[in-house]
Image: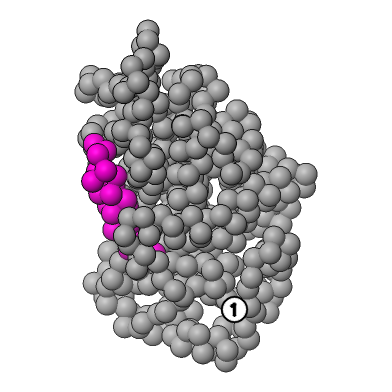
Amino acid sequence: MADEMKNSVIVVGAGVVGASIAFELQRRGLQVTLIDKGEPGRGASYGNMASIALDFAAGSGPLTWKKIPGWLLDPEGPVWLRPSYAAKMLPWFLRFLAAGRPSRLREIEDAGMGLSHRALGDFKEMLQAIGAPELLTEEGCLAIYETEAEFAADRAHLALMQRYGLEFDVLSNGAIQYYEPALSPAIARAVLLADNKSVRDPHKLVVKLADAAFEGGAVFVSGTARNIERSGDGTAVVLLEDGRRIEAGSVVLAAGVHTRFLAAKLGEPIPLETERGYHTQIMKPGISMRYSVIWPHRAFMVTPTAGGIRVGGNVELAGLHAAPDFRRPRVLVRHAQRALPGLKVEEASEWMGHRPALPDTIPIISPSSKMPGVFYATGHGHLGLTYSATTARLIADMVIGAKPAVDMSPFRIDRY
């Protein structure tokens, strides 16, 4: 393989993770080709909740197990499983339960918090590098609890944050409205997460990352990757659906949930599912907000972003191809109006996207176990934006043969 080819990398997927990786590789002196079927940032990254969420929480565990039956039976609960998809979800769900064993749960928490401790610093440095520090807010996030019982039910999560040294302040009624006057006085408690910043426009962020990579010499190819091969001289070849062949020394697969199809063709299937997420973007909300707000009991967020206020979250399990059910975001808006009584819904749009979810809730950031020179960056779930800059650094280290600053064994592709 010629030296020029050795220094070239293909990144498949132009969401926030793929665009971050493309930028980081380009500024380390590699020649990058970014491939996506759509424009950068138009997939799941377009509609995320714009939150840098450092308070990692593993999805499974005994407390979650107790809640699951009620969630599935509640038509307005935080998890919706379409009956037609239940049988297909069963293998993933069994792995999800296994990830909640106490010994495994602590390993997952260590891994997730290991990324979280780096995430904000890496993210700020990335914004500085692309000349866009203003995209990150100064304010943090308020976790709200309507009742003392809701607050008590979340104590395990607060204890986890304490154990890992994350700072937070518990607020009682009155102090809550000092920070966010739009919140209802009926909210009994809130937790101020000062370091859980927000992004002023997540789509604009991805565009700026991609543009910065292109200004450094990266190129964009519009197309859908369908397979990866190695040529006789060791060059990696990405085959596109239209028959084109793109060659490079290395390949990074960062195509969200679609990465699972490419992984399967390489002989390393991964239990990657789609958690369908919804949002409502309200451009005339009738209120202003400084802080993002998360309601843990109802598992949704309200964030001032993209020129308005965004309401979104929750999980729908229905696969890649089912039509959106826009009753879901309307439920979230009703809940949001309970917490924010002045919230109006004028000039609003609804959106649905696919989060790439692994049953143990920590991403795959790993070289391939089957094909040298192929790397994975997928399965970030709700934390793609949060971990984007850190993932980019770790992947770039692996691609150039440097030792990553994090123990990468928890994120390997063959851990299942």
Does residue 396 appear anywhere in the picture? Answer: yes
Q: Is residue 117 left or right of residue 368?
A: right
Colour option used: one colour
Residue at position x 52%, y 67% in the image: 196
Q: Main secondary structure of the magenta part?
A: helix
Residue 150 x, y percent position in the rendering: 65, 73
Q: Is residue 350 left or right of residue 405?
A: left
Q: Is residue 389 left or right of residue 415?
A: left
Does the magenta-highlighted stretch encompass residue 411? no
The quarter of the picture where the N terminus appears is: top left
Is label 1 in a helix, a strand or a loop?
strand
**Vertical comparison of 251 with 383: above or below:** above
Residue at position x 78%, y 44% in the image: 103
Does the magenta-highlighted stretch encompass residue 218? yes
Q: Residue furthest bottom?
A: 174
Residue at position x 24%, y 39% in the image: 217
Residue 366 x, y percent position in the rendering: 53, 33
Q: Kindly indicate the quadrant of the structure image that contains residue 415.
A: top right
Along the line of sight, the residue nearer the viewer: 26 or 341 = 26
Along the line of sight, the residue nearer the viewer: 304 or 329 = 304
What residue did someone put label 1 on?
A: 190
Q: Provide the residue span drawn in magenta.
A: 199-219
Q: Residue furthest top?
A: 232
Along the line of sight, the residue nearer the viewer: 380 or 182 = 380
Does residue 83 appear anywhere in the picture? Answer: no
